[in-house]
Image (cartoon, rainbow, N blue to C red):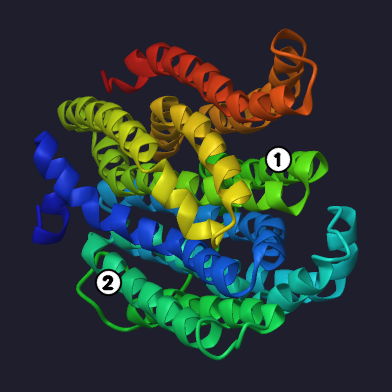
Amino acid sequence: MDEKTNALTQNFSTGKLFRYVLPTILAVLFASLYTIVDGIFVSNFGGTTAFAAINQVSPIFMIIAAVGFMFGTGGSALVGKVLGEGDTKRANGLFSFFAYVLIGIGVVSSIVLTFALEPLLDLLGVTETMMPFCVAYSRIIIPAIALFMLQFYFQSFLATAKKPGLGLLFTVLAGVTNVVGDAVLVGVLSNGDPIKAIQGAAISTVAGLFVGGVIPLIYFFCKNRSLLRLGKPETDGKSLAKACGNGSSEFFTNISGSVINIVYNSLFLYMIGDMGVAAYGTVGYVNSIFTAVASGFVLGVSPLISYNYGAGNKDNLKNLYTKSITIVFVFSAVATVLIEALATPLASAFSHGDEQLMQITVDGLSIFTLSFLFKGIPTFGSGLFTALNNGKVSGIISIVRTLVFNLATVIIVPIIFFYVFGSSYEAAFYGVWYSVVFSELLATFMTFRFLKKYKDKYQYA
């Protein structure tokens, strides 16, 4: 066994496994900070309406970027399995083929969205006051959609290529670029003009995406010391379909999450206007931090699972499963306690001195954070089955969790609160926040059922 693959087959202790996946966790976390940093600067230098506009339009781009996440997670699971089987040439050919197809999809998406943007915003119910801000932000982001996709794609494959530390470096550089851009373009040059502030945030995001998407592309095109390199593609439609099937759960998770965000934005917009959207935006940013850490862990451990599954190392597979479950449980508990304790300072970072907005945000965040106790297991369960190349089960967990449970609870729970705790908007408002907690609890029960059902087939427990 050569030095490059040795790290993928070692028997990990809990601490060693955490250290191995930490660079990938940090890489995904830094990538998620793009919109958070934009939100902090825009909310403080552009105002509540501009901040709400970013939260209204961001789900559109996250839906499109989800294609990159699908190619990355599903493709890396397949390529990792092929590497485990010892076929390095085929692994590189598939890696290259998936990347080229993804670039093509990104270019086409930019062209389509250029013409469809304003009708789409009308369809989403964007108000007249927010429309100029949504358009100003989107027109700058649209040409960079391919870079958005590539950044997600390479985050997954840098872990598979046994270069998670390099993935972290690229993402940190991208994050620094974005932060510096926001500080200059939004904090200094916008001069309090909300449109200039939101345009500056968009330009900063694109600059960060260029660093996070193009530099890894150049790295993989050049001769390197990783397990993978871009070159001649192995055109294989069946493998492409398999990769998309493997990553369908992550794809639907991102799409469904964006759809749910649109639903929540619409509910809060109806209940209390732009301020409700702004409050939910802050809670969504905190949620994205938790999700980034959980997803980063799954992305980091998935290549290990895929490789050992492909190589038939059942003992290592059991060890990875046990250690992963332990880490997920501990992280979920710690994150819940930590965010509950920090609810007020987190809310103040986005409220720009508005006491009413801050109180609404603190109330919502204190309730929403309880869902973190249950979010980790479904995230890991879905990622586990993706790594095992079982896209069907992974997809079921993601779709039922994000669409069925989320949509059902966001309708049912507020109605129950409305009639049980008082027939008022306030009762329904709290019911919307609590709906997420009940949704994730149901998803956790479902995931454990699947983990129990398939443990003998894959021998991970």
Q: Residue at x 74, y 53 (%)?
A: 274
The CA distance from mark 1 to mark 2 is 35 Å
In this orientation, does residue 94 appear?
no
76 and 176: which is toward the camera: 176
User: Amino acid type of disc 2?
Assistant: Leu
Residue 48 lies left or right of residue 317; in this view the side is right
Q: Nearer the viewer, mark 1 or mark 2?
A: 1
Q: Is residue 42 above or below residue 390?
A: below
Rate crowding at label 2 as few (under 14), some (14 to 19) or many (20 or more) other CA atoms within 10 Å: some
Residue 397 lies left or right of residue 349; in this view the side is right
Q: Residue at x 49, y 61 (%)?
A: 36
372 and 250: which is toward the camera: 372
Q: Is residue 455 above or below residue 146?
A: above
Q: Residue at x 64, y 53 (%)?
A: 278
Q: Are marks 1 and 2 in contact (CB under 8 Å)?
A: no
Q: Residue under circle 2?
A: 169
| Picture quadrant of residue 131 | bottom right
Q: Is residue 393 above or below residue 197?
A: above
- Pinpoint residue 227: horizontal percent, then vertical percent: 25, 64
User: Amino acid type of disc 1?
Assistant: Tyr
